[in-house]
Structures are given as C-alpha cells and as structure tokens.
Amino acid sequence: MARPEFPRAPGRAPTTTADPGSTPVAPLDAELAVTETSNPRTVEIDRLATPELVALLVEEDAAVQRALQQAVPALTRATDALLDVMSAGGRWFNLGAGTSGRLGVLDASEIPPTFGMDPECVQGVIAGGAPALRCAVEGAEDSRENGALDLERLDFVAADALVALSASGRTPYVLGATEHAHALGARTIGITCVPGSELARAVSIPIVLEVGPEVISGSTRMKGGLAQKQALHTLSTAVMVRLGRTWGNRMSHLSTTNQKLRERAVRTLCERSGCTLAEATAALEAAGGSLQQALCELEPRD
C-alpha cells in the first residue's frame, strides 16, 4: 500500500530545504532540548507496519524504568519529606498543567478510596481548573500568576507540601506556584524530565526522570507522562505505607463503597483474624463497612 501524502498548509514551503530569504529558526533552548528534539530512533515511524510500530513504542517505554531506577535516591528524599508533612497534619498538593496536571489530579483522587484519607489531605491542582481535565484550556499554563493564585485560593501554607509537575521543567503556571510555595517556606518537590531545568533548580527536592526525546517530538504525554505517573504512585504508595495505612500488602483503610471492595475487605478480615467468611461478613456489616472497626470486633485466632 502506498504511503499517503498529507497536504501542507497553504503557502507553506517544504521544510527539507532552507529558504534563503526566510528568518533563521532560533536554536532550541537548552532546557527544551530533551523534550523537543527529534528522536533518531523514531524519525520514520509513519513508514512502519503496525507490528513494528507497536514494538518500537513499547521499546521506547523501557527508558521509563531506567529513569525511575536512577531517581530512587530523589524519590526516597521526597517520600521522607512528604511523610514529615503529612505526619504533622500538613497537606500535599500535586500541581501541573496539561498531561502533568491530569496525572497529579488522578493520583490524588485515588488516595481516599485506597487508603481512607480525607480528600483534603492530598489534592490535585491543574491549570485551567476542572474543565482542563477533559479538554485543553488554551493558555492556562502560560501564567505564573495563576499558579500562585490557585495555591492561595486553596489556603496553601508553609506547613503544606507542593509536588510540582512539568516534563519540560519550564511551565510558567508551575513555576509561579513553586515560587509562591518557596516564598512561604513550604516543602517543594519537582518532577521533571529535563536535568538542570528551571523547575529542577527552583525546588528543594528535584526528581529528574531522564527518559530522552519522545517518540513523537514534544509529546510528553508519552514517556514523560508515564514516568511522572509512576513517580507519583511510588511517592503516594510509599508515604501511605509509612503512615500505617496498610496491613502488610493489604489495604487496611479502604472505603467499602462497592461489592468488589466489600469482598476485598472480607478477605482481609479472614486473613488477619482467622475467622470464617460468614463471620467476617457479619462483622463488616455490624461495623458499618469500617474495616478497622470490624477487625477490632473480631478476636484474632491462633
């Protein structure tokens, strides 16, 4: 099958040769080089058959695990900092724009049902607000002032912690929020894919995930997004475990809001107390769905 040719925008010359009369294109900013440069391994992906294309995409994602392994020391420091804040009654805010913002909101929203935390304890903030979760909000990420204002509206204080997310490390909205948090004396953690970026320099604890250039140049919803997602769930899981929100590898504070979660709670009660399924079910019902209360009512058996 012949490769399709897509029409160029009217009046736009091909980019394969330079136009002597055109304005020279400025070189990429050093901080943008990693996320914006062309990936030499994927320059002809539009010529690949589906099996080769899919295999290449999966192969590129392997860089995410390597980046996370290298970031273990920074993730450890960030975990301990967040643990200190949460143990003292402070709040944790994930903040970003676009894909980064959506990932921050996603991870924060999973904390209450999984670990039984009040939704106020871990919050997600995205440039453009709730509408930006579904659709791009034009220009939302371009205002430093709005990043600071959004934290002010949430009564962000020195006792809280900010996890600032920006794959490029130079999103104005994120940098403005970081400056505001830093000025208050709050803990600041940055997750970025660009070493030495403005965000990496601005935060107390930079987590730099060097995944290299994207499969589609600049599309950080890909490796950059995957790396940020894994970093976030590593942080949140580690902090919640350290806060005692699990029994071993079982959820000890899950919200029994549906049948699947109630069944999971019953199995946990059986494992922890040695009781029967019927006894565990009855105890959970008597406790109004509270796993912790139900366990207290059951006598552990040898």
Image (spheres, grey):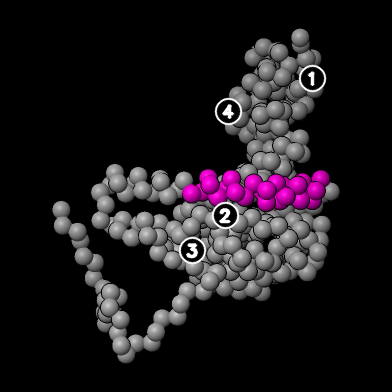
> Are the residues at dot 1 and dot 4 in contact (C-beta closer than 8 Å)?
no
Between 244 and 299, which is closer to the camera in this rendering? 244
Q: Position of residue 255 (x, y in %)?
A: 67, 35
Q: Position of residue 202 (x, y in %)?
A: 69, 67
Q: Can you tell which mark lies on residue 259?
A: 4
Q: Which residue is mark 2?
A: 209
> Along the horizontal axis of the image, is 172 left or right of 59?
right
Is mark 3 in CB contact (under 8 Å) with mark 2? no
In the displayed orientation, state which residue is furthest to the right: 88
Name the residue beneath numbered marker 1.
Answer: 297
Q: Residue at x 55, y 50 (%)?
A: 67
In the image, what residue type sits under mark 4?
Answer: Gln
**Magenta segment:** 63-87
Label 4 environment density (alpha carbons within 10 Å; few <14, some 14–19, many ≥20):
few
Residue 231 rendering spot, x and y as whole percentages: 60, 48
Residue 167 lies in the magenta stretch: no
Q: Is residue 102 visible?
A: no
Q: Main secondary structure of the magenta part?
A: helix
Q: Which mark is residue 35?
A: 3
State the SS at label 3. Answer: helix
Amino acid on which disc 3 is placed: Thr
Q: Quadrant of residue 214?
A: bottom left
Q: For the residues carrying marks 3 and 1, which lies nearer the camera in this image?
A: 3
